[in-house]
Image: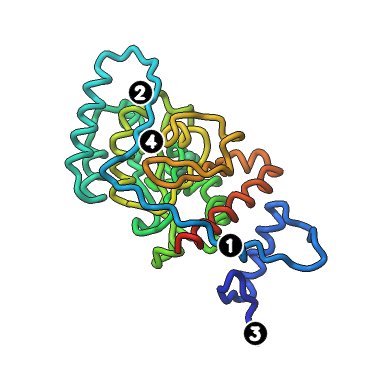
């Protein structure tokens, strides 16, 4: 029996059904044209040049904290991050760094998950309760939705092939108590580690999930205006998207998230 194909990939019946269900859940519940239109069969966008790592773009965070010792803590974070030559060394240095109060209240250090060789890096906000328990980003309800979203365009954190893989991290590596918003000083001391993290992982594209990731990557918030428009963050092409936690609270917004996923998929094809 012939297997259905999607985007050139042969699918088994179970995967094809899951893909259909996901599309329906994203709002694609009726055909708009009489004949199918392959939206991936568009002229390939011009490949964006890779920006040299020597010139990372560091957005300026506006710090309102009156914490006198903050510049020293940021300088220490900069020095530790600069010394780390591998992701393992960086994770060890960041975990050992005591210049962030959140560390005292968290259960586990939450550095990253997925395949570090992936072309796509997803940047979230901070660990929540389940992430804090497991020491891995995006493993709670929002993370499960994130996995289904990216599965629908053929990307997975479990993929060995870098072309189909995801690498996932957060702006903060320690859980803020009660899932409160990260504070400016917490972001400031985490930024040197995050910039080095992205340099070492060297993804082709970054997805900025929600406002805190946009603040870290672009230096501004306003995700409902920013989403869907490609920008540059950490010296690489970056796509702001609404956070899966927001999509869980606002299911109609899945329609736009689906459009953003298609844009990501098309850009990846253009860069291939
Ligand atoms: N939300 C995030 O932004 N990151 C996580 O790891 C989990 C939930």
Going from the N terminus, do you reach mark 3 or mark 4 first? 3
- How much space separates mark 4 and mark 2, taking CA atoms? 11 Å
Tell me if mark 1 has few (under 14), some (14-19) or many (20+) residues whose alpha carbon lies within 10 angstroms of its own: few
Q: Is label 3 in contact with label 1 (beta carbons under 8 Å)?
A: no
- How much space separates mark 3 and mark 4, taking CA atoms? 47 Å
Q: Tell me the tag on residue 172.
A: 4
Q: Is residue 105 above or below residue 269?
A: above
CB at mark 2 closer than 8 A to ligand 1? Answer: no
- How much space separates mark 2 and mark 3, taking CA atoms? 57 Å
Q: Tell me the tag on residue 8.
A: none
Residue hosting label 2: 185
User: Does the image show residue 40?
Assistant: yes
Question: What element does badge 3 sit on?
Answer: loop
Question: What element does badge 2 sit on?
Answer: helix
Tell me if mark 3 has few (under 14), some (14-19) or many (20+) residues whose alpha carbon lies within 10 angstroms of its own: few
Question: What element does badge 1 sit on?
Answer: loop
Please report the residue visible at 29 percent of the width from the left and 38 percent of the height from the top. 193
Going from the N terminus, do you reach mark 2 or mark 3 first? 3
Residue hosting label 1: 43
Query: Which label lies toward us, 3 or 1?
Result: 1
- How much space separates mark 3 and mark 1, taking CA atoms? 29 Å
Going from the N terminus, do you reach mark 3 or mark 1 first? 3
Residue 2 in the figure: left or right of residue 139: right
Residue hosting label 3: 2
């Amino acid at each position: 029996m012939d297997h259905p194909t999607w985007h050139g990939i042969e699918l088994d019946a179970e995967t094809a059904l899951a893909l259909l269900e996901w599309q329906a859940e994203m709002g694609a519940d009726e055909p708009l044209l009489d004949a199918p239109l392959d939206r991936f069969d568009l002229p390939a966008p011009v490949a964006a040049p890779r920006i040299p790592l020597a010139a990372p773009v560091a957005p300026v965070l506006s710090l309102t904290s009156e914490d006198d010792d903050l510049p020293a803590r940021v300088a220490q974070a900069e020095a530790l991050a600069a010394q780390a030559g591998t992701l393992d060394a960086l994770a060890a240095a960041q975990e050992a760094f005591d210049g962030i109060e959140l560390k005292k209240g968290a259960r586990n250090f939450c550095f990253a998950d997925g395949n570090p060789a992936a072309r796509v890096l997803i940047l979230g906000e901070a660990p929540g309760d389940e992430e804090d328990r497991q020491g891995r980003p995006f493993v709670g309800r929002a993370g499960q939705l994130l996995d289904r979203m990216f599965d629908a365009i053929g990307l997975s954190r479990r993929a060995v092939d870098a072309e189909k893989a995801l690498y996932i991290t957060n702006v903060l590596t320690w859980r803020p108590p009660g899932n409160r918003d990260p504070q400016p000083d917490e972001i400031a001391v985490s930024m040197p580690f995050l910039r080095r993290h992205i340099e070492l992982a060297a993804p082709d594209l970054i997805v900025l999930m929600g406002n805190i990731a946009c603040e870290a990557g672009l230096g501004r918030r306003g995700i409902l205006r920013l989403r869907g428009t490609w920008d540059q963050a950490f010296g690489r092409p970056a796509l702001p998207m609404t956070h899966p936690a927001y999509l869980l609270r606002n299911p109609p917004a899945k329609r736009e998230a689906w459009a953003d996923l298609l844009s990501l998929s098309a850009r990846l094809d253009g860069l291939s």
